[in-house]
Amino acid sequence: MKLNKPKHSLFKNGMYAVEGFIDITKNETSFKWQLFLFIVMGIVSWMLPISFGYASILFLSLFIPILAEVANSSIERVVDLVTKEYHILAKQAKDAGATLVLLSLILTLGIWITVLLQAFGLV
């Protein structure tokens, strides 16, 4: 039995990633919001009067919610593939994915608060 495994090459794998990014961007409103926040806060991180090191930490931390949203979208799609009907396990899986996103946002906020307090000498 052949599993769902295509032939691998660096180019093909890169194209699968690009296709996934385009698909999530087109179909997931939450991901669009995450990208919007990434762009806005990314600009803010580089415009602040702080050192390059602090700005880099702020900017890199913005990837955490993006990654969480990609994982959440993957969970939701797999659950929808398995069943469209209500099932408590399906709900719990989707809720766990949403929790991942929420925790990533809290973590990112914590990073920003800590870095900004340190950068401006308030700690």
Image (cartoon, rainbow, N blue to C red):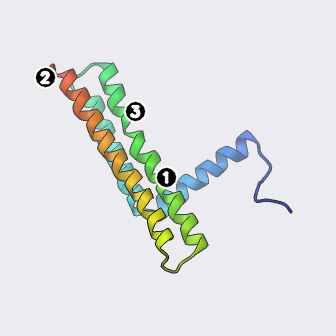
Which mark is on residue 70?
1
Mark 3, mark 2: which one is toward the viewer?
2
Disc 2 is placed on an element classified as: loop
Instruction: Determine the residue located farthest toward the left in the rendered image.
Output: 122
Q: Do the residues labelled 3 and 1 touch (CB within 8 Å)?
A: no
For the residue pair 54 and 102, the one nearer the viewer reads as 102
Mark 2 burial class by Cα count in 10 Å: few <14, some 14-19, many 20+: few
Secondary structure at badge 1 equals helix
Mark 2 belongs to which amino acid? Leu
Horizontal side of 36 relative to 23 (left or right) equals left
Tell me where residue 79 sits by quadrant: bottom right
Q: Which mark is residue 60?
A: 3
Residue in the foreground of this view, choosing between 69 and 41: 69
- Work out how far the residue at label 3 is from the one at label 2, CA to CA, in angstroms: 22 Å
Task: Say the numbered circle drawn on residue 42.
Answer: none
Q: Which amino acid does label 3 sit on?
A: Leu
The structure residue drawn at horizontal position 54% and vertical position 65%, both measured from the top left corner, is 77
- Chain-order first, disc 3 or disc 1: 3
Question: Is there CB contact under 8 Å for labels 3 and 2?
Answer: no
Counting residues from the N terminus, which is met first, the one under dot 2 or under dot 1?
1
Q: Residue at label 2?
A: 122
Q: Position of residue 88 (x, y in %)?
A: 46, 73
The quadrant the N terminus occupies is: bottom right
Give the spatial CA distance, label 2 vs label 1. 35 Å
Amino acid type of the residue that numbered disc 1 sits on in the rendered structure: Val
